[in-house]
């Protein structure tokens, strides 16, 4: 079994493979070093979508061909790189640190580490007198456009941490109460349900709590990332998935008949 000291090398390997596959330049800054765990989870999510037969393309590179990671909620998303995951004629954006406001009230908002939103989701530019004295704008999207918001915690799991993710789930996903938006929990769904990635490994009682949370809420808690648990796909995984209406029809047009028979 891998020790917790090996996870940084795992992240470096995933980033290098991503750079090589897309002919990019990797520019690593000090802030990105401190956010290595989040970047590792980002690439684990990209690998999941590739395993699910989505086509992955990179967007908004720098002039030098660098993929610029957004690791702070204060950044303007329009100035940073992101990924498009496409299947058939349907496409989604996978972004970092995108502020989401709840459809219940616009002042209930937060920036999850990773978000999957509909392609071309409008990013609102907002000024508020109570933010930077009205001198700077912040950027946000509506929870109505969010497929799944994911959080990354390079910590050992504990009950309060796991329960807090339920609040994030409720805030970031309008589909959990709006059953007309075409997002449902389904074992053959293509999207990973909202997931909290946790660095440390869980004790037996924590594993029971995780199992119970995943049973009553359409979300996932993945632990042991520091020990190399980066693979989110395969029959050994018992993770909740989301079925977005229209995705299967798009996949049927793009892939051979019988593809779904290969799903775990």
Image (spheres, rainbow, N blue to C red):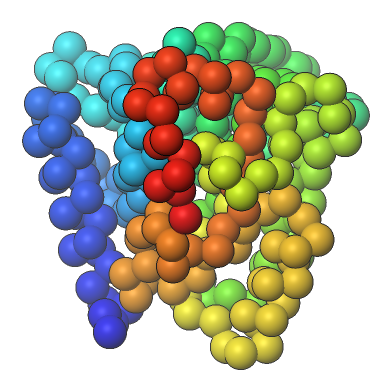
In this rendering, is residue 7 above or below 47? below
Which residue is the extreme one toward the bottom? Answer: 204
**Residue drawn 12% across the image and 17% down it:** 64
- x and y percent of residue 106 in the render? 83, 24
- x and y percent of residue 48 in the render? 39, 45
In this rendering, is residue 212 above or below 197? below
- x and y percent of residue 244 in the render? 63, 28
In this rendering, is residue 122 above or below 83? above
**Residue drawn 48% across the image and 79% down it:** 201
**Residue drawn 28% across the image and 84% down it:** 1
Is 194 on the left-hand or right-hand side of 51?
right
Is 84 on the left-hand or right-hand side of 198?
left
Q: How many marks?
A: 0
- x and y percent of residue 51 in the render? 34, 43
**Residue drawn 34% across the image and 75% down it:** 227
Residue 132 appears in which quarter of the rendering?
Answer: top right
Q: Report whether residue 201 is seen.
A: yes
Residue 254 appears in which quarter of the rendering?
Answer: top left
Q: Depth check: 190 or 167 in front?
A: 190
In this rendering, is residue 112 above or below 74? below
Which residue is the extreme one toward the front? Answer: 257
Q: Report whether residue 135 is seen.
A: no
Q: Depth check: 247 or 42 in front?
A: 247
Is 224 on the left-hand or right-hand side of 227?
right
């Amino acid at each position: 079994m891998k020790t917790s000291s090996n996870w940084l090398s795992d992240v470096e390997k995933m980033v290098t493979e991503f750079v090589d596959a897309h002919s990019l330049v990797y520019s690593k800054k000090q802030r990105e070093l401190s956010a290595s765990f989040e970047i590792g989870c980002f690439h684990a999510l990209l690998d999941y979508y590739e395993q699910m037969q989505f086509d992955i393309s990179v967007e908004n590179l720098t002039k030098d061909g660098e993929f610029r990671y957004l690791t702070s909620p204060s950044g303007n998303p329009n100035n940073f790189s992101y990924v498009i995951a496409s299947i058939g004629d349907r496409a989604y954006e996978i972004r970092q640190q995108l502020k989401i406001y709840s459809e219940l009230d616009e002042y209930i908002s937060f920036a999850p580490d990773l978000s999957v939103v509909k392609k071309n989701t409008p990013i609102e530019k907002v000024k508020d007198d109570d933010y930077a004295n009205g001198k700077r704008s912040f950027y946000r999207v509506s929870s109505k456009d969010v497929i799944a918001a994911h959080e990354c915690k390079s910590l050992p799991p504990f009950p309060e941490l796991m329960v807090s993710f339920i609040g994030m789930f409720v805030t970031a996903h309008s589909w959990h109460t709006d059953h007309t938006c075409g997002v449902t929990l389904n074992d053959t769904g293509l999207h990973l349900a909202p997931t909290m990635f946790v660095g440390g490994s869980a004790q037996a009682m924590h594993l029971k709590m995780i199992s119970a949370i995943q049973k009553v809420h359409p979300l996932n808690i993945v632990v042991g990332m520091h020990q190399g648990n980066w693979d989110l796909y395969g029959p050994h995984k018992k993770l909740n998935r989301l079925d977005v209406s229209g995705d299967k029809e798009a996949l049927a047009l793009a892939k051979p008949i019988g593809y779904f028979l290969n799903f775990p």
